[in-house]
Image (tube, rainbow, N blue to C red):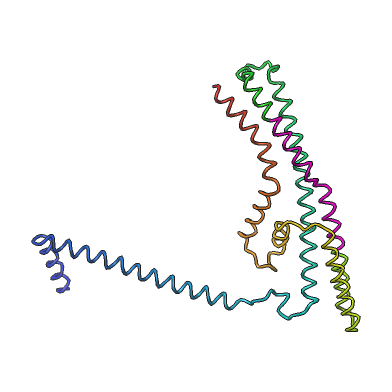
Amino acid sequence: MFTLVWQLRRLLHLWIKKPATMKRLWKASVLHRKQARQVAKRVRESELRVLCRDSKSNKPSLPPYLERNRWEEELNYKLWITKGARFNAAKRCEEKDYAATWTNALLSCYLIIVGLIPFVPNPAFKDFSPDILSFVTTGVSIMLLAYGLIVATQRYPMQAIVYHECALKIGVLYNALRRAKELKNEDDKTKEILRISLEYDELLSRYPNHHALDSALFETSKRTYFKLSRWECFKRRRLYWFHTKAIHHFAILIPVLIVLKLWLATK
């Protein structure tokens, strides 16, 4: 207690009698604490890098289906994930075709509604000038024309049929492989697996490849097997929405927002 009181008296004496010395001591103390924090930060970063390196080194270098180096297991995995991805690809094309139909219908409705605005007796609609109505009508017409051309060239219904047909054929091979793995005769088993593998390769060459999003979305339906977090599943579904339905939603909302902004500008 006496030592603490003596140190406080000494600091007070330095503060009053020698403020420059006290200022230098204060700066030195601040610099010392800053350096100590930087050293502690570097130590924590070094420890974190060591933990990350150890965790990576503990992970298996091969996928689970290749750890035992068995060809039938790898082929089983390929058939399973390709079948799921192709079914998702067919579903994606169907959703895009459904959304495109609704978008075309709503944009056409917008054109009819904008054309009927001058004939509405309500005074609230008299604020729309003919120039604004002409601009909106022309803009929606251009959007409808461009959108219709883009959708027509994609041929989503045909793509959906092709992907669904491919998924069904892969499903047949998948079931055949499951039965082949139960054969007792090793020669018959090897011949059957080889036949299925050749048919699978030929099947892939006859059909277009699916989008990477289709495989990513299929993995979210098997979150436990692929060890995906809920946040990762949410990000993949959000990316799927952006590539599948976002343009349709924006095409519907943009004309409404433009009309609302122009109407508020006239107020």
Which residue corresponds to the image point at 71% horizontal and 48% vertical from the top-left?
244
Q: Left or right: where does residue 137 sit relative to residue 158?
A: left
Say which residue appears at 88% left-offset and 79% top-offset. Answer: 189
The count of marks equals: 0
Query: From the viewer's perspective, is residue 251 above or below residue 179?
Result: above
Q: Between 19 and 75, which is closer to the camera in this rendering?
A: 75
Residue 141 spot, x, y in % from top left: 71, 30
Image quadrant for the C terminus?
A: top right
Which residue is found at the position 79% from the left and 77% from the top?
71
Q: Is residue 158 magenta?
A: yes
Q: Based on the displayed image, in which of its 4 quarters is residue 129 positioned?
A: top right
| Image: 44 above or below 147 | below
- Does residue 42 sit above or below 234 in this rendering? below
Of 182 and 196, which appears nearest the observer? 196
**Which SS type dominates the magenta stretch?**
helix
Tell which of 7 and 68 is nearer to you: 68
Query: Does residue 128 show up magenta in the picture?
Result: no
* Vertical position of residue 177 compared to residue 15: above or below: below
Estimate the x, y position of residue 221 in percent, counting from the top left. 72, 61
> Which stretch appears magenta?
140-169
